[in-house]
Image (cartoon, rainbow, N blue to C red):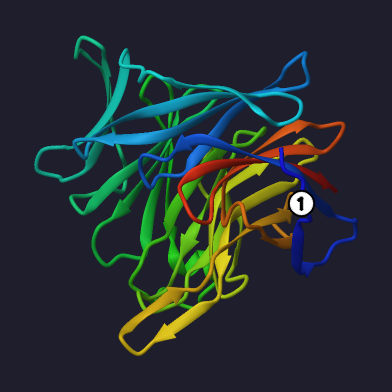
Amino acid sequence: MRFMPIVLLILFSVSAHSVTINILSEYSSPVEMVTSNPVRIDSCQLLESGGLRISVSQSVLFNDVSFNYESWTIVIDSDWCPMSCDRAALDNSFKLSTAQLGGSGEMCLIACAEQGDTLWTCALEGTDEFHVNPFVTEISEGGYLVNNDPDCHSTCTEIQSISSAGEMMCHYSLYTDYLLDLPEPIGETAAHVHSLRSTSSGDILIGGDVQQWFTSPVAGFVCLLNGDTGNPRWRNAGYFRGMASVYDAIEISSGHVIAVGTTARSVESEESPFPMWDTKQAFIAVLNATGTLQKMVVCDLDIANCFYSIIETDQSESEFLIVGTGSSSYELVFLKVIISI
C-alpha cells in the first residue's frame, strides 16, 4: 500500500448539507482492460482478515452481435497488498445477442442456451437498421437494461427495460436536446450511455456523455427514468473543466446519487474542427435525490485519470470503493473513499 497526499480540487459545491470526500488508500491490480468498455464493480465483500474480495466485470462483444461478461475476482489484504487475482471463465451457459428483424429493420435481443436453443426473443422498440453496439446490463432484481446507439446522424438513443423472461417492460427515446436543455431539438449526435443501473424504487439511472454537434465540447450527464413508463424524472449535465464523461452513477443508501468519470479542458486545434481532450483527471460528483448537484470534486492523482465504477461498501462509515484506470496504462486501480453527506 502506498500512502500519499491526495490533492482534491473542488470545482463546485452547493448544498444545505456538508459533503466531504476523502481518498484513504489505493491499490493497483495486475488486471488490464481487454476492451474499451468500462469495468463495473459487481460486488465487494469484507473478509474476516480485514481485507476485501472484489468482483469486477466487463462486457465483451463477440462477432459484433453476441456478447457476454468477462470477470475477475481480486483479493487484497487489510494493508491493501495483493493476495490473488483470478480471471473467471466466461459463462457460456447463457448468451445474449442481437439481430435485425426481417423487413422492418428493428433490432431484437435474443437469449440462447448453451446448446444454441433460443430461449426468448424481444424486439427492441424504437430501433432500426441504423442502431448498433448494444449495451446490456443485467440487474440484480432480474432482467436487463439495454441501450442502442445509432451509427448515423441522430439526436436520439434508445433505452429499454426487459424482464428476465424477455418481456419488454418499458422503452424511452432519450434525446440530446432534453439532456442539454436546448430550446429546440437541433443537433446531430446522440448520447453515449456508459452506465445503466436500477434504483431501489425500480427506476432507471443512466450515466454517459453527450454533445450537440460533432464539433461541440462533450458534457457528462446523469439521468433518471421512471421504471414503469420510461419517462424522465430528472437530468443533470455538465462540462465541468470543459469536457466530461460520466462512466458510472449509483444510488446510495441515503438516497443520494454518486457519479464518477473523467474530465479535462477542451482544447481547440487548427488541424481539426473537433474538440480535443487535454490532460484528463478523474472526478466524483454527489447529487441529491432530485438530481441537484451537491458537490463536484476533481482528483489530481498520479495513479488514475479516470474512474469507471463505484460501490458502497460500508453504510455506517460512508465508505466506498472506486475502480479506475492508471494515467499511463490500462491497469485497474482501486481506491477506498469516504464520502460523508
Q: Is residue 33 above or below residue 186?
A: above
**Left or right: where 288 falls relative to 245:** right
* Element on which disc 1 rests: loop
Question: Which x, y percent locates residue 91?
Answer: 36, 17
Within the image, what quadrant is residue 197 found in? top right
Nearer to me, 106 or 60: 60
Tell me what residue is drawn at x 42 percent, y 60 percent: 191
How packed mark 1 is, by other alpha carbons closer than 10 Å (few <14, some 14-19, many 20 or more), is few
Q: Is residue 101 above or below residue 74?
A: below
Provide the residue designation for mark 1: 4
Quadrant showing the N terminus: top right
Tell me what residue is drawn at x 10 percent, y 38 percent: 102
* Residue 295 in sight from this viewpoint: no
Within the image, what quadrant is residue 77 found in? top right
Mark 1 residue type:
Met
Question: Which x, y percent locates residue 239?
Answer: 58, 71
* Residue 276 in sight from this viewpoint: yes
Q: Is residue 117 above or below residue 78?
A: above
Tell me what residue is drawn at x 69 percent, y 48 percent: 258
Question: Which x, y percent locates residue 165?
Answer: 38, 19
Nearer to me, 286 or 227: 286
**Left or right: where 100 falls relative to 221:** left
**Left or right: where 168 falls relative to 233:** left
Question: Which x, y percent locates residue 62?
Answer: 24, 33
